[in-house]
Image (tube, rainbow, N blue to C red):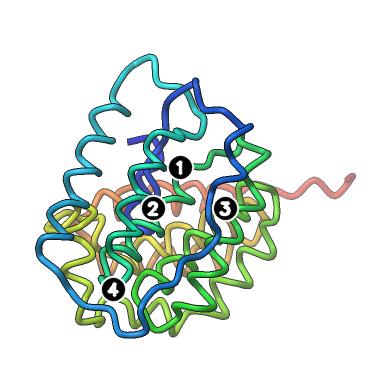
Amino acid sequence: MKNAIIISLMIFISPLAASACFAQTAEIKLNYDFSPELTTNARAIGELKGLLDEYIKMEADPGAALSFDYGTYRKLDAFILRNLKTRSGLTALYMVPAMIFPEDTDLHGKQMSILDYLIDSQSACIQGKMAIIAKAVALEGRGQKKEAVKLLEDKYEVILSIEKDPYFSHFLDELSIKGKEDENVMAIYYTVLSSILIQLGDLEPAAERLERIVKQYPQTSLAASAKKKLESISRAKARPKDNNR
């Protein structure tokens, strides 16, 4: 899955459909009138998983294009409108920004607006909390690396509370990642943060986050990747500095 980290967080599935039409993007909604008291509904969870599975199969097409799939969005929009009283409806909205790639420049504003709506208006819900990491990834993709780091560090306590959220298990189930290592939100958080810090040249704080992954999530592929990055950082530190620069 091309956007695996984001879908787990936001996560974010990679879209396909080269036929996406930017002339239709005005119809993409920025927010919905969700009930203040959302419920957990097994039927809605099952239906959303079905939509996700359908999309994953489409995404596996070798000819898939990196562009917004308006057809999938219409299905998610219809699902959301039927589920404004369920948490699954909010999860479906959380999935929409994941369908927008860096190449979809006309949609960047709407992507950020949806994430901001989730973060600001649904802050008590797991989807609003997960949207923080998703927004950081989106910012990093647009070159706003310092802003991404600040967001992640400022919201550390919020991210830390995600795995304790009583709805977390259902959320993982909806995204078909329950029982997989992608459910280790903090490992993903540290992976995203350390990656951006490395790009900024802040090797010491990056190494600190990578070491946490290795110690706290040793059996995951993220830990294996973290070890390789730590080795690269060690080699970088060992290189003699060019004083002529």
Callout 4 amino acid:
Lys
Q: Name the residue under label 2.
A: 95
Q: Which of the two labelled residues, at mark 4 and mark 2, occupies the earlier sequence position?
A: 4
Mark 4 vs mark 3, CA separation in Å: 23 Å
Classify residue 139 by image quadrant: bottom right
Q: Residue at x 16, y 51 (%)?
A: 47
Q: Do the residues labelled 4 and 2 touch (CB within 8 Å)?
A: no
Q: Which of marks 4 and 3 is nearer the N terminus?
A: 4
Q: Tell me residue 33's x, y (percent).
A: 44, 72
- Earlier residue among tags 3 and 1: 1
Q: Position of residue 116 (x, y in %)?
A: 57, 68
Q: Please name the residue that numbered disc 4 is placed on.
A: 85
> Is 122 above or below relative to 136?
below
Give how far apart the Cα atoms at labels 1 and 2 are: 7 Å
Classify the position of the N terminus by image quarter. top left
Give the mark nearer the N terminus: 2 vs 3.
2
Disc 3 packing (10 Å; few <14; some 14–19; many ≥20): many
Q: Which type of secondary structure does the marked residue at label 1 adopt?
A: helix
- Label 4, label 2: how far apart the Cα atoms are: 17 Å
Q: Residue 99 carries which label?
A: 1
Q: What element carries label 3?
A: helix
Circle 2 packing at 10 Å, graded few (<14), some (14-19), many (20+), is: many
Q: Are marks 3 and 1 in contact (CB under 8 Å)?
A: no
User: Label 3 sits on what residue type?
Assistant: Gln
* Badge nearest the viewer, 4 or 1: 4
The one nearer the camera, 241 or 159, is 159
Residue corresponding to mark 3: 111
Q: Residue at x 28, y 60 (%)?
A: 82
- Horizontal and vertical percent position of residue 169: 16, 69
Apparent side of residue 163 relative to residue 130 in the rendered image (left or right): left
Question: How far apart in space, not on screen, are marks 2 and 3 (Cα)?
Answer: 10 Å
Q: Quadrant of residue 73?
A: top left
